[in-house]
Image (cartoon, coloured by chain):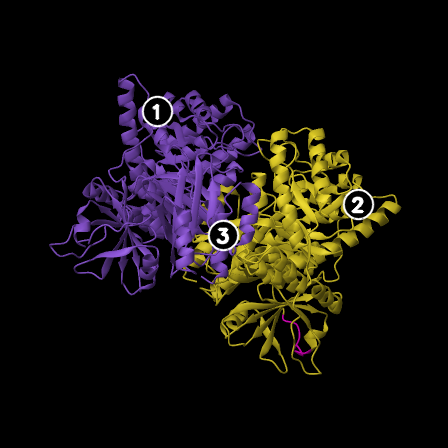
Chain colours: A yellow, B purple
Amino acid sequence: MRKSIATVSVSGTLVEKLEAIAAAGFDGVEIFENDLLACPLPPEEVRARAADLGLGIDLYQPFRDFEGVPAEVLAGNLRRAEHKFRVMERLGADLLLVCSNVSPAAIGGDELAAEQLRLLAERAAAHGIRIAYEALAWGRHVNEYLHAWRIARLADHPGLGVCLDSFHILSRGSDPIGIEAIPGEKIFFLQLADAPLLAMDVLQWSRHYRCFPGQGNFDLAGLVESVRRAGYVGPLSLEVFNDVFRQASAERTALDGMRSLIALEQGAHERGAYERGAHERGAHEQGAHEVTHPAVPAGFAFAELADTGAVGGMLAALGFARTGTHPTKPVELWEQGGARLLLNATGADPALIAIGLDSPDPAGAAKHAESLLSPILPRERTSEEARLEAVAAPDGTEIFFCDDAWLADFVPSGPVPGPVTGIDHVALAQPWHHFDEAALFYRSVLGLRPQESLELPDPYGLLRSKAMSGPDGAVRVVVNIAQVGADHLPWQHVALACDDVVAVARRLRREHPGLLLPIPGNYYDDLEARHEVDPGLRDLGVLYDRDEHGAFLHVYTVTVGRVFFEIVQRIGGYQGYGAGNAPIRLAVQHAAGH
Amino acid sequence: MRKSIATVSVSGTLVEKLEAIAAAGFDGVEIFENDLLACPLPPEEVRARAADLGLGIDLYQPFRDFEGVPAEVLAGNLRRAEHKFRVMERLGADLLLVCSNVSPAAIGGDELAAEQLRLLAERAAAHGIRIAYEALAWGRHVNEYLHAWRIARLADHPGLGVCLDSFHILSRGSDPIGIEAIPGEKIFFLQLADAPLLAMDVLQWSRHYRCFPGQGNFDLAGLVESVRRAGYVGPLSLEVFNDVFRQASAERTALDGMRSLIALEQGAHERGAYERGAHERGAHEQGAHEVTHPAVPAGFAFAELADTGAVGGMLAALGFARTGTHPTKPVELWEQGGARLLLNATGADPALIAIGLDSPDPAGAAKHAESLLSPILPRERTSEEARLEAVAAPDGTEIFFCDDAWLADFVPSGPVPGPVTGIDHVALAQPWHHFDEAALFYRSVLGLRPQESLELPDPYGLLRSKAMSGPDGAVRVVVNIAQVGADHLPWQHVALACDDVVAVARRLRREHPGLLLPIPGNYYDDLEARHEVDPGLRDLGVLYDRDEHGAFLHVYTVTVGRVFFEIVQRIGGYQGYGAGNAPIRLAVQHAAGH
C-alpha cells in the first residue's frame, strides 16, 4: 500500500521534514498546517519541492470547528474554508481533513452537521477538493468514528467521506471491526498511530505520547485488517505527535516510521492470511494473533564483549575457560557448560558489543531484517571463515544470526564443566531518545514479544526497563533506558543461568572476595520481614525475588568498564528478572564509584 | 515551625541526601525505606550520621497494606511490623507512617480497620513507637483524610494519630478546612507537596509530578493555616516525588525545598493574620489570598545586555540614543521614551544579563530575597556610586532592586523622544531542569503572579513558556524553558512597548531592511482566514493576535548572539504575549540560522 506520513511526525523546518521523509522512501505526506504557516516558501514552491522529491501531497490538515454550528457562525466558517481551498489549490492538495467540532459554539445534531458538511463538500468540489471528516476522541458532539460515518452517510455527497485515525478509535476503546460497515470508497484516508497505555487525559495522551505502529500497545494490525476488508485502497499514513520525536533526528525518525509501516504490512498480511484460513476452517483458535518471523531466535549462540583483560580475569574466576581463538581476529572463545562468550581485544574498554542468536534460518533472518531497513553490517572474512549475517541494533550492538558453523572457526578444545548452563538474558543500554525505536526493532526484526515496561529508581534518576522475550524464554533481552534528559547510559550486563546460585556464591565469596557486589544488610532485614528465606542468603549476599510462578535467586559481579555479570537461578516457572532488587544493585554500584 | 524533608525528595545515595539536606538547614528528615534498604550502613550508623549532621529522624516511611484484612493476613502483617519496629529502634525513629491499604486482600470496614490499627499501636508502644495513619488518594477502602481520622478516632489509642499529606488531600479536591475538626495532638505528621494541575491518573501524578510548595497550583497556605488552627505543632515536612528532582543536584534541590517552606511560612503567616483580621472585622473581603511582598516591583528600571557593538547598532536603528556612560565600568546607558537599556562591554557575546526593577524599598526587597536564600551579589563600587542591591535569578540573570539613584551614576544627557514608551516584558531562558525553581523564585522572591504555562512548538522540540506578572502588568517576565532533554537554551529577548507598531515597522522596513524578522506570507493567508485585518500587516510583516480583552500587534528583530528585541503594541486590555505567533517566529529564526 501507498505509504505517507504527516509532517508533524518528524522534527525540523518544513523543507527539512520533506527531505527526511523522501529519503526514508515515503510516497506522500500530509501537510500539517502549522508547518506550512511557518515556512517562508509559498505553497507553489512547497508543491514543487515535494514533487522534486517524489512526494505526493495526500492530505492538508487540520480544518477545525466547522460543523454543527448556528447559522451565524456558519458563514464565517465557510469563509475560512474558502481561504483554505485557495491555499490547497496552490499546494496541489485535493483532500482536506475536517476534525469534529470541539468549540463551545457547536450545538451539534446529526442532521445539522450533515447539512453543513454537505454544503462544505459542495464548495470544496468547485475547487476539485474532497473532505475527509474525522471524529476526534475529544470532539464536543462527535467523538466516535461510527458517529462520523453516520453523519457522512446522512450528508450523502460524493466529495465527503471519513478519515479514520487509529489513535482516536483505539484510545476510546472502540472496536475497529465496525470499520467493515463503511464502504471502502467512503474511507478517504487512514491515519495510523500507536501509543503506550497511559491513564491520562486523552488529549494530552494524543498530543505527547503517540508513537509508530509496533512501539505501543494498540492492535494496529487488527485495525488495518478491518480497513482492508472494508475495501480501502488509500495510503497508510503515520500521524504521530511525540515529544521525543520532536527533538530527534528527522532522518532517523522518518526511517523508523517507514520500518513501522513495513512491519505492520508484513504482520497485517500474515495475520490476515491466518485469520482467513482460520475462518475457512470454521475455527478461531487461540493464537490467531501470532505472527511467525523467520528471524525468531531459538537461543543465544554467544555474547561478545570488548576486553582489555579484566573481563577474561573475571570469567576465569567465574569458572569459564578459554577454549579457542579466532584464526584471524583478536577474538577468544570462553566457555562454561552451555554458555559461550567471545572476548574481543578491540582496544576499547570492556562493554557488551555483540550478541549471537541461534537462528533456524540465518540468511532468511538477515533478509527479514534488511526488509525492515536494518543496516546489514559488512563483515571482513577469509574464504575459510564461517559466513555470519549481522545487523546493527539501534544502540549499535551487533546482532548475529548464527547456525552451528560459526563455532568451527574457533576449533574449540572441548567442553568446560561448571554450574553455568547458558545465557539467561542480556541487558543492553539505550539512550533515552531511542527507546521507541528499540522497542520496534526487537519486536519486528527479532520477533521478540515485549513485556511490561518498568521504572527503576536509581540514586540519580529513574531508569526505564523493558524486557522482551522469544518463545519459551529461549532468548530474553532487557533494554534499560536512562531517564529522559540523562547524559549517561545505564550499565550493560550478561546474566548467566545456573542451577545452584547459593553454591556458586559460596565458592566465589570464599575464593574471590570482592568479585561479587556486596549487598546491604538492610536489604535482608526487609527481605526477612516479607518472606521466610534461608538466612544463608544474607551471609552470601544472594538476592531473592518471587512471583506467582516461582522464585529467583541471583548475584551480581562488580562492574568492569560498562559491563558486569549476573548469575541467576530460576526456580519453578519464575518469569521475571528480579527487577525489585535492581534499585539495591544500582545504589551499591553507584556507592562503589562504578 | 520545625522543617523536615523526606529523603526521596532529593537525588543521591542516602548519605549524600542527608548531607545535602543538612546543608540546606533542615531540622529533620523522613527516612524513605527504599533509601535505607539500598544503603550499606547499618541503621545505627545512619542514626549517628544524621545526628552528626544535626538532623533528627522525624518519620520512618512507608509501611503498606496493613489494616482492614482477614485474620489470617493480619498475623503476617504484624510479623512484618515487628521487623520494622526493630529497624526503627536501631535508627532511633519513633514515628511510623502507615498508608491506607491498597491491596486486593483488604476487606475494609471501619471497625475492623480501627481494631487492627489499635493492635498495631499497642505493639508499637512496646517499642516506644507511635503510628501515623494516612489516607492514600488511591487507597482501596480509605482514601479521604477525614475517613482516616474517623478510623483513628474509633481506634482510640494514644499512640495512633493521622498523617496529613497535602497531595493526597488536594489532588482529590477535598476541602482542607475539615482538618480543623481534628485535635492538633492527633495530627502526628504533616507532609507537604504542591503539584501542577494535570488531568491524569492520580497515582502517576503523585509519583512523578509533585513539586515544592509554590511551584504548582495547590493552595498550600490555606491547608497549612487549617493545620495550624487545629493546633498542630509538629514539623512541616516536604515529601516530593519528582522525575526532574531525581536527577538534579541534591544540594540545589534541598535548598529550593527550604526556600519553599520559608516562603510558605511567610505567606501562611501573612494570610493567617489577614484572615484573622478580616474575621474580627466581620468581613471576608475579596483579595484575602493576596500576600504583600516588600519586593513587588513597580516597573522596569532597565534591562542590561552584554554587547560587543552589534546591540548598540541595533538600538540606534530602533531609535535609541546613548545618553550616558558609567564613570568606572564599561557600561553605556541608551534611552528612548521611557525605555532604558544598559550595554555592558563585558567581552561576552550579546545576551540579556541583568534586569533593574523599580522597587519601593530596595533594601527591604534585598532583605526579603535573602530571607528566601537568594544569593545576594557582591557589587564593587566606589563611594560616589549609587548603592544597588542585586540577587541572582536561577538562570544567573542579575536582578537589581532600584530607586532613582542608580540613574545619577550615568549623568544622562536628557530625554530621547521616540515611539517606544518603555519595556513591556523581558523573556529569559531557563535550562529545563530548573523550571520549578524559577517558578518559585519569581513568585516568592519578586512577588510576581504566575500565569498559565504554554507549550510552543519549535522546529526542534517543544518549548515551555511561563509568564509571570506584577500588579497591573507593570512588570512582566516570561520564562522560556527548552524541552526536557534539550541541550540548548531558548533565545532571550526584550519586548519594547509602543503606541504604533505599524508606523515603527514602516520606518524600519524602509530604512533598515534586514533588521526585522521576515514573516512568511503563509502566516497572513491563515491570519486573513481567521480575522478581518488590515492588509498592511502583511506588507510590513507585523504579527497580530487578539484575546477577549483586546488586540496585540508586534514585530521582532533578527537575533544577535543569544538575544533579540520585540516591539509590541497592546490595544484595549490585551493580556497575552502573542504566544500563538511564537512558533512562526521560532521557525523563521531557525531557518535564518540563528
Please name whichever residue, B385 or A353, is drawn nearer the observer in this view of the structure: B385
Can see residue B435? no
Label 2 amino acid? Glu
Q: Please say if B203 is above or below B394.
A: above
Q: Gap between marks 2 and 1, in whole Å?
A: 61 Å
> In the structure shown, which secondary structural element does the residue marked by tag 2 occupy?
helix
Quarter of the image containing the N terminus of chain A?
bottom right
Q: Callout 1: few (<14), some (14-19), or many (20+) C-alpha neighbours within 10 Å? A: few
Q: Mark 3 lies on which chain?
A: B
Around disc 2, counting alpha carbons within 10 Å, would you say few (fewer than 14), some (14 to 19), or many (20 or more)? some
Which residue is the site of mark 3?
B539
Distance of label 3 from label 2 (alpha carbons): 44 Å
Quick one: A55 or A193, which is closer to the camera? Answer: A55
Q: Let me know if marks 3 and 1 both belong to one chain.
A: yes
> Is the C terminus of chain A in the top left, top right, bottom left or bottom right quadrant?
bottom left
Give the residues in magenta. A409-416
User: Which residue does the image show at 62% across and 83% down from the upper left?
Assistant: A328
Residue A415 in the image, given as x and y percentages of width and height: 66, 72
Q: In this view, does B448 lie to the left or right of A226?
A: left
Q: Is residue A474 left or right of residue B124?
A: right
Where does label 2 land, which residue?
Answer: A185
Between disc 3 and disc 1, the foreground one is 3
Q: Is residue B171 above or below residue A314?
A: above
Residue where numbered disc 1 is placed: B286
- The x, y position of residue B386, in whole percent, is 16, 51
CA distance for labels 3 and 1:
47 Å
Query: Which residue is pictured at 19% across the width and 45% down the height?
Result: B404
Question: Does the magenta run of residues contain A414?
Answer: yes
Toward the left, the furthest residue is B383
Instruction: Please tell me whether mark 1 sits on a helix, a strand or a loop.
Output: loop
- Give the amino acid at mark 1: Gln
